[in-house]
Amino acid sequence: MWNKVRKIICLALLVVLTISFMSEVILAAGITSEDSKEDVVTSTGEETSEETKREEEGASQDDEAVGKVDKSQWVTLKDYDLVAESESYRMYLYSPRLSIILENKETGEIIESTLSDEKDDGTSNKTWNGYMKSGLVINAIIGTTNTYQVDLLTTENTIELSYTDNGFSAQVYFPSYGFGLTVNVALEGNELVVGVPSESIVENTEGTYISTISLYPFMGYTYMDEEDGYMLIPDGNGALIYLDDKEGRFNSGFSQPIYGNDIGFVDSGITRLLWDMYDTVRKPNDVIAPVFGMIHSNKEIGYLGIVEEGDKRASIEAHPNGATVNYNRIFAKFMIRDIFVQPLNNSNTGTVTSVERNRTDMDMQVRYILVDGDSADYAGLAVEYRNYLLENNLVELKDISYNTRVDFLGADREEWLIFKKAVTMTTTDNIKEIYSELEDEGIESLISVYKGWQKGGLYDLPIKKYKADKSIGGTKDLTDLIKEAEEKDYNLYLYNDALRINPAETNSTFNVVKRVNKRTYIEKVYKEVYKEFEFLTPARTNKLLSNFVSSYTDEGVDNLAIAGISNNLFSYSYQSNYYTRYDSGDDYTGLISSMYEKTDLLLEQPYSYLWNYTDGFLDMPLSSSSYMTVDEEVPFLSMVLKGIIPMYSEYVNFEANQKEYFLRMVEAGVYPSFYITYENSSALVYTNSADLYSSEYSAYKDTIVEYDREFRKLASLLDGAYIVDHEKGDDGVTRVTYDNGIAIYVNYADSDASVDGMKIPAMSYKIGDAR
Amino acid sequence: MKQRKWTIKIVAIFLLAVLLSSLVPSVATAKTPYKTFTIDGYGNVNETQTSYLPHKTITKFGDESFSGPSDMHVTKDGEIYIADTENARIVVGNLEGELIKTIGEGDLITPKGVFVTDDKHVYVADRDAGAVYEFDPEGELLNTYTKPNNPLYGERLDFLPLKVVVNDAGIMFIVAESNTNGIVEISPLEGGSFLGYFGTNFASADLMTIIYRTILTDEQRGKMVSNVPSTPDNLAIDDKGLIYTVTRGDKENTLKKLNIAGTNLLGKTEYDRIPAAVAPGNHDNIYVASQQGYIYEYNGEGDLLYVFGGLDDGTQRVGLSTLVSAIQVDLEDRIYVLDTDKAQIQVYEPTEFTNLLHQALYLYSNGRYTESKEPLTEILKMNSMFNYANQAIGRAYFQEENYELALSYAKLANDEEGYSDAFWEIRNLWLQENIVKLVGIVIGIWLVKKALKLIDDKKNIFSGYRRLKAKLGENEIISNLKYAKHYMYHPIDGSYGIARQNRASYIAPTIIVVIFAIEFIIDKYLRGFLQKTVPEGRYEVLSDLGMIAIVIFAITVCHYLVCTINEGEGTVKKIYTFLAYSLMPYILFVPIRFVLTHVLTLNEQFLITMITFLMVGWVIVIGVIGIKEVNNYTPKETFKVICLTIFTILIMALILFVLYVLWAQVFGFITEVIGEVVYRIVE
């Protein structure tokens, strides 16, 4: 009896389960397919570039070209009023469009700030026409749409103009949008200062806001290839876009936020991975300094634009002809309020678009330093920028004595059974050995950044106190090493990424950065052991870094290299408060400046507002991001900082063309850097540092010694001189002139060249006297 | 033959030039917008030195720009032929962007493929014209080859040529759209005679398809997606007349190198899902471009050397692509990539690193191992993890009889053959040195044992040990463990004991399971290099343990469930006991096998295979006997119960999966509701 019952129950169970399984599988399949559909919809909904949006808008509203204005109706210089005059320039204003014209009193050459009716080719639609001829262009948000263009031609507006000693102030109001602002323009000597004070912004209509503000987006524009010259963009070390005919090759130009993307808003957005796993595309360089330039070579006139205020939430826009319109133009665009996508669940299948609640409270100001004559080239702009930085105490002279930079990797981790195992690459004893060998080879001084020294290895982040990994020799050995080495002028700096937290090693429930949509920011690294990192809030960074530094300096050592917070800037939300890039920027600047007082500090690729707080510039980029629009790379930042801050290159190891890279360092006045391990780098293959594929000391020793000899000799000749000129000849020879009369000739060509009576061998350099 | 000699000469001269000038410098950007990856013998993908730099972008020849170009051919003297599809012509230019000529204007409709022979005859595959055109070097139309009227071609098949290559004899190999029979081979004789299909791909049929086909009716089968063989997407020909094809969907066989008989000379290769084009290089190497802009370089054996490039992420950077349709290599190893969408040619040039690699490839493939060590050492200095270099230098050291180094490099490169050979030599040397010692030790041990036994017989020195042994034997657990061994040799008797004589227990079997798990893990992760199935340094011990626990639990429980409704006599305890005891052969054999994996080479592999076979067979046999005897089944019933148990386990796994999916849905729904509520409240 019991057996039978058991049998029946079991059978029933089997049948029921089978049936339910079948139905569930079908159901589940249905659900997943729905999911994927929704995914597609949301992803296409996001992230269309603004330029395209405007285009679409324009297309739907008024696609036809408005045509050229009849000659009798042209607004010309005679319609302009002279509003200011300095020793070298006159400034004229056409108030309905807030258009200004700057006239060089000596040469008579002019710089226009908006498209003139004369140069209008008549091929643009109404929206673009308004954009090009207006001195002020605003993008407005209505509801959750941010594609409304507001300008002084197509939008109804009132302007209250008042004149000042050296310019004017225009209070602009757009009644149909219910917002307005004041534009201040002043001519100070050979500098034009254009700005919008934060307190002048009024937004009276609920739900209608200002999103972006572009001041004089056509300042110094040119039509097609009518002028020779170039635009200077702050990509990498510096890059030029020529003012030649682009033959319609580009439909967009350079558009990058100053100080990198804001991870609070923008997804890193990797769309395609090799074999679904590997990210093969490198991120473009961040914009390190808030500058841009325009040079009209044939007229020997141009300017350097410096974004003085509002730089932390602005982007540099440089568009060559063919990018929608036939004009070359470069400008800064300020963002005071943005929209973002708010997901409603964890799988991101439901989203709503939201508007940032408050606008960023920031003044906006661009300073145009006008150049003419011989100074009207990128070298002249570099000189101007250096003077500007020095005069305004934005950077002070540092000790620029020569050092070769030899960094070490201490330890990383790999998976081992159920634990993680230390992979030790360079111990303190190894470093001692390396140092004494290098000393024997005659290297007088060095700096080293020691990465992965901390307990738990390179990626056990954050570093909470001064405690070295056992596998590299322990804290005491490390302290002794730093002290001993310092005596022979070998300075070992401890590397500290003060931004990142490793959720696999440290509880990251609290004190981590959440994006504006209140989702924790996760940095995916596509690596072996640790796949994700998160960012600490600036407050937490402050606490941890301060603790670390006090425990470190208590030991009598104070060499510190800070990374992470030196080149990241973001908006974030934490505990229902919202913080802007200004908040995180201010926090980091405060923290780093106080660290600078307490320690000997090096910063990894610091953004310009931190340049004053570092004894050296680590990882100075030597190449651009290879944008298609870029025609030439120039070492602009190096020209600015040479003789002020010692600059160290990115690692030489990973360059495929090492000869060429050597010459680039010579040209830019940058000191060489190596990333060294004592063990063979193949030991790293299962760690997050697997991309460190070539670093063994024994393979690089000779190169280090050789480079040290060459660069030390060069540095002793230059001895703190500034770069005053930089020219590229047609023969592949670049001449860099210093203000102490020394010129360096670098020949990149694969054949010998003779310049200025000197023979420069192929792929080599020579030191000579400036003409 | 003459042709071949000439090519070798050219290659040799070029290599010499490379050696002398110590590599052509470049003034291109030092940092590329893409990373370069290589793959090691363990399948690890690692970043490596930039292999190729973007050199130049050609958007037009003279004033002639392209519109939807879909093929390209670069001749030995550097002329670039573009199939300018939407402009219905062939444009010829050079690296400087100068226009040389245009061909076929007026004749062509949609030129999709272009090929140029050494004597500058231009072949154009025109899809909409349904023809392959041959032009002479002056651009005059010589021949038109249309659809073959041979019945073997297939009467209802259209002839829509997409790509064409031509060998020295003038025979055309044509990839035609929607022709699944393979590459169309046409001889120029008699205005084009059809020779047959070349390099036919086979329709792949996986297990599920085969099962479906046997079960379904004809009607149902008709509704299935028809399982036709994939057609090559593109092809290329080298100087030796070998044909290279890429076929999407063929996975590891995406890239093929076919000899004249149509046999694939390559094994499995790393592949791209959307290959666009293939080109042979100058050093027996092969290049493949993916539509998404990834560029692969393989050596002659199909080992991946590099992959680089990528899809333009919207940042518009030089070297990233949008839609690649053709790839070519010139005599200076520059790579030309044609981007249909951007209507441009991106030229990449090799770096110092790549030039070294090519030099090593050349020397190594000619058997000049010792010479090849020089560039290989340079390469390893720049990247000590570069797999090809590790493998090649290992083999080179082997040739020089430096076996220790050969062994370590072979291990680094996961080169099993190289490792085995080197190990054999090392073992041989060791044996020669130590054979006397070994024999001495064995004799020594034997003597000591004899002596101890003699003394024991007289003085009884081991009495304490024997007493202890006897006492332990009375312990229930120990006795049960001993019984496990008994079960192994006498499964029928042993099962009777478990079923009837109260030999079932929990502790002893659990000890056996634990020993099994420990042995399993040690064996899996620490066995000899040649037998290892997991890559060095990878440990997933927790999941292994979990897996063992789940499998044993599932078998025990499901078997019990099935038994209860099939009048089996087993209880959970009994079933667990005999299952665990059935693992005894594994426990005894694995240590022996483990030791063997450390001393045997590939030549003696059969010993290990034999032990494994014996062990697994034994486990299964005593397991099945256990099922039969413990439950008191007939053989037929036993078979039925085994099948039912397997079925039940599958169902259980599926139920768990379904529950998981359902739970995830519920969870997602709840968080979504909460998320929306919170959002609305906050707003």
Image (cartoon, coloured by chain):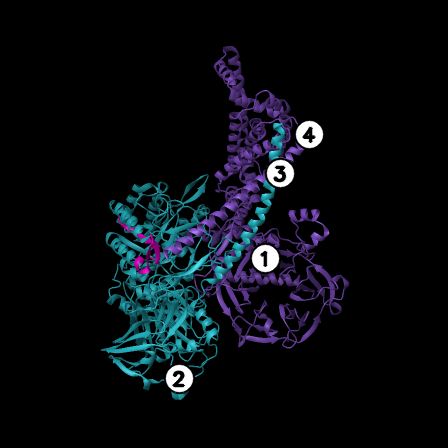
Q: Amino acid at mark 4?
A: Pro
Which chain can be seen in purple? B
Is residue A771 shown left or right of residue A687? left
Residue at numbered disc 2 = A118
Task: Out of B352 and B18, give the one closest to the viewer.
Answer: B352
User: Judging from the image, what secondary structure is the residue with disc 4 in?
Assistant: helix
Residue at numbered disc 3 = B647
Disc 4 chain ID = B
From the viewer's perspective, is residue B673 above or below residue A50? above
Of pointers 4 and 1, the one earlier in the residue sequence: 1
Label 4 vs label 1, nearer the camera:
4
What is the magenta range?
A557-584
Where residue B312 appears, as percent x and y from the top left, is 49, 63
User: Judging from the image, what secondary structure is the residue with disc 2 in?
Assistant: loop
Residue at numbered disc 1 = B284
The N terminus of chain B lies in quadrant = bottom right
Q: Residues within 10 Å of mark 3 (few under 14, many from 20)?
A: few
